[in-house]
Image (spheres, rainbow, N blue to C red):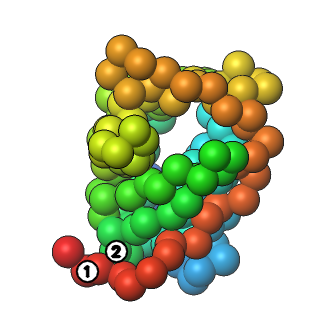
């Protein structure tokens, strides 16, 4: 009896982390990966719909999101063109994302890497190095679909 409980405990300990990092069907992918955004106080519209898998270290907040392919979307409310790399990394804590890599936005005829995002409940503040811009958080309530041709690179 004790052996079977030990085996079951070891099995759960090993399998549980693998389940959260394993891709599921399309509906689950959206709700699993995007649920982490909600858990940390962010709207789901910060990630596109083509999430393949994600890994998060709940102790440090380090995360990695893998997309099926590079993605281009138009972000609300000012229709900025944004690109998402196949791999997005950063560090997330409640209402704050730092060390963000893999999301770029075109503004003033130039591409800028978004390095951080903060949420004060009403507005999202996007950081691009030392510069920042605020937008209403409620404009990011839906995960955007990727536009145009899909690149596998």
Q: Which residue appears at 36% of the width and 62% of the height?
A: 66
Q: Is residue 56 above or below residue 9?
A: above
Task: Choose top left, top right, bottom left or bottom right for residue 151.
Answer: bottom left
Q: Residue furthest front?
A: 109
* 112 left or right, relative to 58: left
Q: Residue furthest left?
A: 153
Residue tagged by mark 2?
69
Q: Is residue 55 above or below residue 122?
A: below
Residue in front for this viewpoint, 132 or 90? 132
Please indicate, yes or no, whether residue 63 appears anywhere in the rendered image: no
* 71 left or right, relative to 5: left
Task: Choose top left, top right, bottom left or bottom right for residue 67.
Answer: bottom left
x and y, in percent, of residue 19 in the image: 48, 65
x and y, in percent, of residue 31 in the image: 66, 63
For mark 1, does the 10 Å Cα neighbourhood hold few (<14), some (14 to 19), or many (20 or more) residues?
few
* Cα separation between marks 2 and 1: 5 Å
**Dividing the image into 4 quarters, which one contains the C terminus?**
bottom left
**Dividing the image into 4 quarters, which one contains the N terminus?**
bottom right
């Amino acid at each position: 009896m004790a052996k079977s409980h030990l085996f079951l405990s070891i099995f759960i300990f090993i399998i549980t982390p693998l389940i959260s990092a394993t891709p599921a069907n399309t509906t689950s992918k959206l709700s699993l990966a995007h649920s982490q955004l909600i858990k940390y106080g962010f709207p789901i519209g910060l990630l596109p719909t083509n999430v393949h898998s994600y890994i998060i270290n709940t102790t440090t907040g380090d995360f990695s999101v893998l997309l099926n392919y590079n993605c281009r979307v138009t972000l609300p409310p000012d229709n900025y063109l944004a690109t998402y790399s196949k791999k997005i990394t950063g560090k997330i804590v409640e209402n704050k994302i730092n060390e963000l890599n893999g999301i770029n936005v075109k503004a003033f005829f130039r591409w800028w890497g978004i390095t951080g995002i903060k949420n004060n409940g009403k507005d999202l503040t996007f950081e691009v190095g030392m510069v920042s811009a605020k937008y209403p958080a409620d404009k990011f309530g839906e995960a955007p679909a990727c536009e145009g041709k899909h690149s596998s690179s």
